[in-house]
Image (cartoon, rainbow, N blue to C red):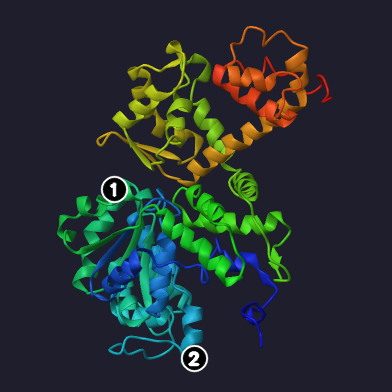
Amino acid sequence: MNTSRDRLKLPIRIGDVFKSIGQPTVTYVRRKDARFEDTLKSAVQSSGQLCLITGPSKTGKTTLYKKVLSELDLQPLIIRCDESLSPTEFWAKALESIDFARLTELQTSGSLKVNSSAKISGKIGWPWLASIIGEISLGISGETTEGEVKARILANPSPMHIIPILKKLPLCLVVEDYHYLSDTTKRVIFQQWKSFVDEQVSVVVVSTTHHAADMINANKDLLARVCHIEVSRWPRSDLEEIVEKGFNYLQTTLRSNVKELIANESVGLPILTQQCCEQLFIDKGLGMFNGEYDVDFSREDAHRALRNLAKSRYGQLESAYSKLITGPRKRARKYDTYELILSCFAQEPIKFALKKHEIDERLASLDLPPDKHPPPASVASTLNALGRFQSRTEMEMLEWQTDEEILYILEPAFLFYLRWRGIAEIEKSKEVFRVHAPALLFKTNALRDIKFSDSVRFALAPNSAGNDFNKQIELLYEELLKEKVLSSKLLPKPDGPEKK
């Protein structure tokens, strides 16, 4: 009889189990007892419903709507927004996103599923679209080429060009990142949006949490016609379920404390959980898993995976980090306010948004000399300048909402990077410290006046019973950090004394 592992199609690519790109299958988790999926499915099927999905970046909003639309046999017709789009360009982008070639292929093969009340005659394409919009209104004659028909339609596109397609074909309009649109474009588009409600066509809109009210603010008539789903940061239990599903599929056991560590350090993002699990195998040279033997992963393995993940997948955030902590006119500033405000997001508890009073409280909790604490005026001016500074440097990491007095982090993965970047730096400094510790212990006078605790002084004593060299180094390192005397001035340069 075959074992369950024998029934697996081995070898298997770990990236296909813990999938961070594309739609996860093995490790897909239905959150809140499938409430999100059921709510969205019901809203899409309700004629004329505007389905608003909000939440921080990388919390699974795209995965959610793609899963639901797939179950409903609907293809997403996606508009990805940016601040340069005008209302005309917005609707043109939707029309140009239609893959008529693919739809024709499905039509020819007989696998194109359409609404039971919809009738499709002729070949699907731009001429077909013109026929259902109204050829006379477009000024189209029988001799007009397909390219000319397309140009006529795109010359002045509107919702009334999109709605007939959505009513007849198995498509669902999805608007991603609408918060990037200019305020003027938002107002025009959302004034036009009621057409979808009147024509009983449901639409999916995806955005960030703090822009959830933009649609209603632009068109009050949409109030009570919006189904709002807030996809918040994932709880640890759901992230642990991702880990469990993947390892159960591979019939491989993972220690519970390692599973908890991965879930805790994923800052509520399922993509980080998937990537960390994949990195565990990659670090052991097991990108392809053949199941020949059980693999044991320790907490040290998980720490290494998290550090490597921060470096390999999110290392590009270093540039944004450097720009943010430097800020404008670095030399002219007395306080490191940009860097200190950024550090507030790395403090516990981890939050994607901080109110002004929370920023003040976290800044006050920092262990800094009195002359290094930024005054209220410096904090206020820094927050107000953040938007302009980021625009000039072409990055979008933080957003300060003046009316709400809330600072939002737009890229939650930045929190993960900040934490594990710091841990990697600590590990690096520990290693340098380890190499040069003998020189510090026995050849310099820098430690002469430090008042170590009795337990540490005993542990650091030469030939102290029960303590090896590694333990001595660890205790000394931590004590020096605590006493604020460990610095680049204390550490020898790379060409200094060698390890004995």
Name the residue beneath numbered marker 1. 184
**Residue 381 on image: x %, y %:** 36, 23
Look at 45% across and 15% down and name the residue there.
372
Rendered-image quadrant of the C terminus: top right
**Residue 110 on image: x %, y %:** 46, 92
**Nearest the camera: 31 or 230?**
31
**Nearest the camera: 254 or 116?**
254
Q: Amino acid at mark 1?
A: Thr
Position of 129 relative to 395 (above/below): below
Look at 19% across and 55% down and name the residue there.
219
Position of 87 relative to 477 (above/below): below
Q: Any mark on residue 108, and which?
A: 2
Look at 36% across and 86% down and name the residue there.
114
Rendered-image quadrant of the N terminus: bottom right
Position of 146 relative to 349 (above/below): below
Residue reaching furthest to the front = 465
**In the picture, residue 278 is in which quadrant?**
bottom right
| Distance from the alpha carbon under mark 2 to that under mark 1 | 42 Å
**Nearest the camera: 240 or 326?**
240
**In the picture, residue 13 is in which quadrant?**
bottom right
**Residue 143 on image: x %, y %:** 43, 83
Look at 18% across and 60% down and name the residue there.
222
Q: Any mark on residue 295, and which?
A: none
Left or right: where does residue 333 sit relative to residue 436?
left
Helix, strand or loop for disc 2: helix
Left or right: where does residue 118 sit relative to residue 15?
left
